């Protein structure tokens, strides 16, 4: 039976959301989320407990949104109806909003499975409300340092969260990330499911220069890598011998990259293998596919259904989009930290020919106010003749231009235009018909780019999709 | 004409002390030397390696995370620290940022209250502070009686206090600086400069990069070298953009949530 308090809270929350949508304030989901926790602090717990298939909770620095969308898509392929929080609404308020909007007047969920993308620092708090059937931990990279301090801070609060998990939970972890796999030491209750890449040809023998995890999480000795995939993901081992990357339960055994058309992936799982033509390019997206596969297996989805889901999936809002514009194509991908940005560049560079770039860098709170991280991105890969024109825009356009200059991009191919609309025009004019313009904005810069695109009629508002 | 000798830069702990983009300082030094026809060798020196003071014309020491810094301090204080001091006393240039700056002081105190000895190049002492200082910073310097500004981004909770044997690098116009109290930022001893400014520091403050290069070249060649000017329009614009932004905000653009 729903409590009267819960019903009242649900009504109020939904009313607030509807009102703010009418007022044109965007999704309105966060407003509802602020109201309900105070009126009905148990709503998130009560509603998620009633979900017949349980909940999956997803956290990590890179790939949360794409992976969560991917899982939702696969679950729908399997005939389920997931409730999930919207992109970016990954604090507690966003989780409350999602379940409240999904609930009937009688306080019952309409969906049958919960799927929650959770901010790294919010994870311990979220797990006090939700007892997940699957907790999926993707990776820990340096991100917006001014907010969280450092990677060890996230690893530390996750340790405590993992230690509280019970036997009803499957802990699905990235076996190739020593910071994430190191959490397994602290998990006593849950079942464990590891995932990783076992195709040697997808990696390289050397680590990139700016790596966040050089020390063994167990004993603090130096780590060595037999193979590096991206950032500090790879086949690691502690030089003192007490900690080694395991053979993953769920593995991609073969990656056949097909440029920015994606890759053909071969999977090995405890419930059989399959192959899938996966349309998202880049090795970081291979990890997203692996993570989603592990989570869906733990939720009981058949491998064949997972494969079909991977093949029919297209990317999430702003993470990676292709927009036809002025007989050109705008490739829009969010950049937010050194590892993610480096991987996006690597993917772009798989394409032959000249590249026109629009780099939009802001330093608002949601972007991270410290843009020092641009110096840890591998822009050296753009040196020499690989750039046709790089238009630098946003609040920190000048910083971006200096970074490119010191990376070896000729200064005559660098333009600074702080205004996003004017910068987009310059970039489009520099590209020929049929060519792609690669727009790489930070978070608030992406909202600015989309505002410009919406004003010019190229895309709809994001809460409409 | 004889070829100019190769400049030798030592990068201390590039694997462990490499957060906040401090690597950009190395890139700035290398490029600005190369653009003037000076070849550069960069040698990474990390845990277990030896630092030869005669082979270092310029030493760079960046910031790190607490866990990494603890490992580095054990390795650095002692033989490597002494070699660093020897190089600076012999005329080498040095730039240390944040964690590297603290480790070069007389003492530093860890978060759990342990006071540990530093290498002792700078007469400074660092202790944990009550809050974290995060934000764009603007510093005024007058190293040769010429007033100049430095822009950067500070992110530290450590507070550093200067002793009698050291000068501050500059005066804080916007930001916290060494300790948030006395308006000083950084320290200078001979050709060695330490401070809290990330950003990276040198690309947006090319005059300081050139100053370090000039010191290093003098040490290498034994003679004063006038560096030809470069086209620094992008760098100067970036410097000015940050300076205007912090001045217009009447202080901090934005401080952290804690
Ligand atoms: Zn170990």
Image: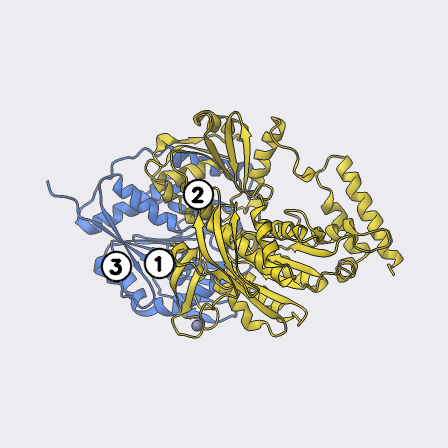
Chain colours: A yellow, B blue
The residue shown at (28%, 35%) is B229
Instruction: Report the front residue among A130 and A376.
Output: A130
Q: Position of residue A463 (x, y in %)?
A: 68, 39
Q: Quadrant of ligand 1?
A: bottom left
Q: Is residue B239 visible?
A: no
Q: Position of residue A167 (x, y in %)?
A: 66, 72
Callout 3: residue from which chain? B
Determine which residue is flagged by label 2. Answer: A259
Mark 1 to mark 2 CA distance (whole Å):
22 Å
Mark found first going from the N terminus, 1 or 2: 1
- Which mark's residue is nearer the viewer, 3 or 1? 1
Determine which residue is flagged by label 3. Answer: B87
Badge 2 local density, few (<14 within 10 Å), some, or many (20+)? Answer: some
- Which mark's residue is nearer the viewer, 3 or 2? 2
Up-down relation of residue B78 to residue A353 (above or below) = below
Residue A104 placement, left or right of B27: right
Determine which residue is flagged by label 1. Answer: A205
Q: Position of residue B32 (x, y in %)?
A: 29, 41
Callout 1: residue from which chain? A
Mark 3 to mark 2 CA distance (whole Å):
50 Å
Q: Position of residue A50 (x, y in %)?
A: 78, 61
Instruction: Report the front residue among A201 and A386.
Output: A201
């Amino acid at each position: 039976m729903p409590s009267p308090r819960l019903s009242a809270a649900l009504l109020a929350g939904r009313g607030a959301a509807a009102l703010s949508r009418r007022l044109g304030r965007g999704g309105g989901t966060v407003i509802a989320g602020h109201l309900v926790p105070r009126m009905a602090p148990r709503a998130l717990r009560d509603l998620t407990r009633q979900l017949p298939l349980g909940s999956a909770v997803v956290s990590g620095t890179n790939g949360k949104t794409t992976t969560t969308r991917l899982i939702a898509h696969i679950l729908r392929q399997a005939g389920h109806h997931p409730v999930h929080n919207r992109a970016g609404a990954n604090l507690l308020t966003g989780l409350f909003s999602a379940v409240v909007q999904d609930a009937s007047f009688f306080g019952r969920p309409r969906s049958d499975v919960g799927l929650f993308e959770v901010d790294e620092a919010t994870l311990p708090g979220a797990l006090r409300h939700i007892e997940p059937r699957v907790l999926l931990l993707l990776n820990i990279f340096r991100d917006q340092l001014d907010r969280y301090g450092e990677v060890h801070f996230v690893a530390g609060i996750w340790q405590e969260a993992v230690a509280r998990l019970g036997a009803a939970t499957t802990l699905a972890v990235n076996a190739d990330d020593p910071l994430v796999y190191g959490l397994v030491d602290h998990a006593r209750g849950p079942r464990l499911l590891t995932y990783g890449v076992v195709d040697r040809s997808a990696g390289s023998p050397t680590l990139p220069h700016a790596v966040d995890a050089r020390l063994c999480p167990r004993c603090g000795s130096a780590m060595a890598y037999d193979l590096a995939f991206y950032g500090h993901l790879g086949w690691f081992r502690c030089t003192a011998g007490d900690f080694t990357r395991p053979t993953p339960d769920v593995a991609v055994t073969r990656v056949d990259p097909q440029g920015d058309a994606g890759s053909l992936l071969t999977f090995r799982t405890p419930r059989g293998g399959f192959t899938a033509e996966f349309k998202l390019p880049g090795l970081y997206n291979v990890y997203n596919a692996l993570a989603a596969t592990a989570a869906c297996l733990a939720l009981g989805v058949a491998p064949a259904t997972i494969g079909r889901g991977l093949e029919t999936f297209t990317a999430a809002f702003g993470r990676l989009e292709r927009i036809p514009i002025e007989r050109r194509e705008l490739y829009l991908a969010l950049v937010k930290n050194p590892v993610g940005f480096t991987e996006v560049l690597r993917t772009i560079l798989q394409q032959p020919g000249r590249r026109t770039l629009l780099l939009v860098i802001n330093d608002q709170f949601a972007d991270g106010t410290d843009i020092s991280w641009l110096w840890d991105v591998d822009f050296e890969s753009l040196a020499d003749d690989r750039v046709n024109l790089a238009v630098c825009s946003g609040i920190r356009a000048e910083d971006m231009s200096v970074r490119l200059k010191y990376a070896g991009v000729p200064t005559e191919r660098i333009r600074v235009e702080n205004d996003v609309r004017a910068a987009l025009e310059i970039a489009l004019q520099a590209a020929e018909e049929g060519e792609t313009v690669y727009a790489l904005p930070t978070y608030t810069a992406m909202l600015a780019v989309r505002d410009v695109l919406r004003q010019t009629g190229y895309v709809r508002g994001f809460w409409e999709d | 004409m004889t070829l100019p000798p190769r400049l030798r830069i030592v990068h201390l702990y590039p694997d462990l002390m490499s957060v906040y983009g401090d690597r950009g300082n190395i890139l700035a030094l290398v490029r600005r030397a190369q653009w003037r026809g000076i070849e550069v060798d960069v040698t990474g020196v990390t845990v277990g390696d030896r630092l030869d003071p005669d082979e270092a014309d310029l030493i760079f020491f960046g910031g790190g995370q607490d866990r990494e810094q603890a490992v580095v301090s054990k390795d650095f204080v002692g033989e490597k620290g002494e070699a660093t001091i020897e190089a600076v006393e012999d005329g080498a240039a040095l730039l240390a940022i944040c964690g590297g700056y603290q480790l070069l002081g007389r003492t530093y105190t860890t978060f759990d209250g342990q006071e540990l000895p530093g290498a002792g190049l700078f007469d400074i002492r660092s202790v944990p502070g009550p809050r974290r200082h995060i934000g764009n910073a603007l510093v005024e310097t007058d190293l040769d009686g010429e007033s100049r500004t430095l822009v950067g981004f500070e992110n530290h909770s450590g507070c550093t206090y200067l002793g009698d044997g050291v000068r501050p690098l500059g005066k804080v116009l916007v930001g916290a600086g060494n300790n948030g109290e006395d308006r000083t930022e950084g320290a200078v001893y001979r050709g060695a400069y330490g401070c809290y400014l990330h950003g990276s520091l040198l690309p947006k403050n090319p005059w300081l990069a050139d100053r370090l290069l000039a010191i290093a070249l003098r040490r290498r060649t034994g003679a004063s070298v006038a560096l030809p000017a470069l086209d620094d329009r992008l760098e100067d614009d970036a410097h000015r953009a940050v300076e205007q932004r912090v001045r217009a905000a009447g202080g901090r653009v934005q401080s952290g949530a804690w």
